[in-house]
Image: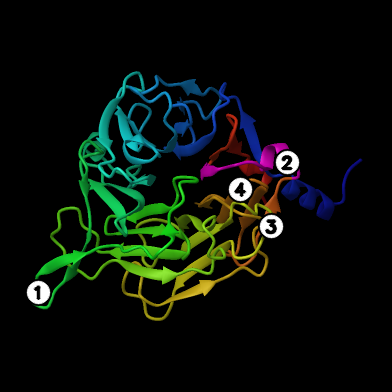
Amino acid sequence: MRLPLLLALVTATASAQFTLQPSNSTESFRGIHAVNDQIAWASGTGGTVLRTVDGGEHWLACAIPPDAEKLDFRGVQAFDEKTAIVMSSGKGDASRLYKTTDGCKTWKLVFTNPDKDGFWDALQFLSISNVTNHALAVQYARGVLLGDPVNGEFAIFQTGDGGDHWIRRTALKRGKESRCRIDTFAAAQGESLFAASNQSLVYPHPYLFFFVTGGSKARLAYVDHFDLDFSFCHESAKYVDLPLGDGSNSSGSFAVATKGRFAAPLEVMAVGGDYKKPDATEKNAVLLRPRGSVHSLFPHKVEMITPTTPPHGYRSSVAWSEDLKAFLTVGPNGTDVSYDNGSTWKPVGTDPEKSNNWNALSLPFAVGPKGRIGKLDRSAFP
C-alpha cells in the first residue's frame, strides 16, 4: 500500500540509524577515527585495534602492540591507511601511546605516562586531510594529549612531530615584566575527566584547543593562541562553567565538538549527563556561541544555549555532520540529532539494536560495547 506523502516522510526519518558492520570481535570499543568514508580505525579493550580501508565492509584485526594484551585502548588517531596512534587509558604506566606506520603490522611504544597516579583520557591531532604534501603533514602533525589531574593540575602533553616525541605542556601567561610565566590548568577539588569516547578534548585549530570536565564541576577549559614552539605568550588557561551534570562523580560533560574547522568564531557543543542515570534527560547538552563583536576564534563572552527538547538520555559522544548540517550525539539508550544548533533534539532510529549502545562517534562510523561497529545511513535523513 502506498503511504501518504507526509507519513512516508515521517517513516523515513524515524528509520534513520546505523548499519551494523561485522567486527569479528567481542571487545568493547571506545576509540574510533575516520580518516574519510573509506578509511577508519577502531580501538578497544584487550589491546584490540581494527581498521577498514573499504568503508567498513571488512574490518581487519591489527597485530596487538607489544605488552598490550591487557590494555584498554580508548583513543585512536589515524593519518591514513598505514599510520595511526592508539592511546591506552589506565593508572600510571597503563596509559601509553603506540604508533604504527605499516598498516598495524608492527607497533612502536612512543610514550608512557610519566605520572604514577596519572590517567589519560583523550588524544587529538589537527586534521591533515586537506594538505598538499601528505607525507610532511604526517611527519610534523601537531597533537595534544590530555589526562586526569596530577597534583591538582590537568596533565597536558604535546607533540609537533606526528607523535614520535611528547613534552609536558603548561599554558603561558604574560607577566608584569613582559615575560612569559607558567599558568597551569588547575583542577577544582573533585573535578576530573571522562575517557568515555576520546572526546573530552578537541583540537580544531593550530592555536586553540578545548577540553571538558565533570565530577564536582562541569567546565569548558580552553587555551587561546596555543603554540607548540612557545613563541607566543598570551593569557591562557581559561574556564567556562557548564550547566551539565549534577556535581556527582559520575556526571558532567563527557564530550565536546566544534562546528566546522579553521573558522572564526567557533561554536562549541558539549554533551554529557550522568552515566549512572542513562535515561535522565536533564543537563545533558549545551551549545556555546560567541556573543557580541567577535575578533578571535573563541571570545571571552559566550552565549549558552540549553535545549528546549534535550537528547533523551546521557550522551558520551557528539559530532557535527557537514553533510547533514546537524549535530549527532550517542549514548547507551540511543542516538539523537539536532538541525537547529542544539536547541531541539529528536531520537534517531526505531530499532534499538541499531540506534542504541554506542560509545563514540567519528562520522560516518560509531563504535560500542561487545564489538559493535556501525556506519551512518545518510540516505535515511531528510
**Magenta-colored span:** 350-363
Q: CA distance from mark 3 to mark 2?
A: 15 Å
Hey, which quadrant is residue 193 in on the image? bottom left
- Give how far across and how far down residue 158 sits, in percent: 25, 48
Q: Amino acid at mark 4?
A: Gly
Give neighbour class at mark 4: few <14, some 14-19, many 20+ (Cα, 10 Å): many
Mark positioned earlier in the residue sequence (1 or 3): 1
Q: Amino acid at mark 2?
A: Pro
- Magenta-drawn stretch contains 232: no
Q: CA distance from mark 2 to mark 4?
A: 12 Å
**Which residue is rendered at x = 24% and y = 60% of the image?**
226
Secondary element at tag 1 = loop
Query: Which residue carries the number 3 mark?
Result: 346
- Give how far across and how far down residue 191 sits, in percent: 43, 61
Q: Which residue is at the front of the view, 73 or 55? A: 73
Hey, which quadrant is residue 62 in on the image? top left
- Give how far across and how far down residue 30 sits, in percent: 50, 39
- Residue 102 as seen in the image, left or right of residue 29: left
Residues at badges 1 and 3 in contact (C-beta under 8 Å)? no
Query: Which residue carries the number 1 mark?
Result: 178
Query: Which residue carries the number 4 mark?
Result: 331
In this figure, what is the number of numbered marks? 4
Query: Which residue carries the number 2 mark?
Result: 352
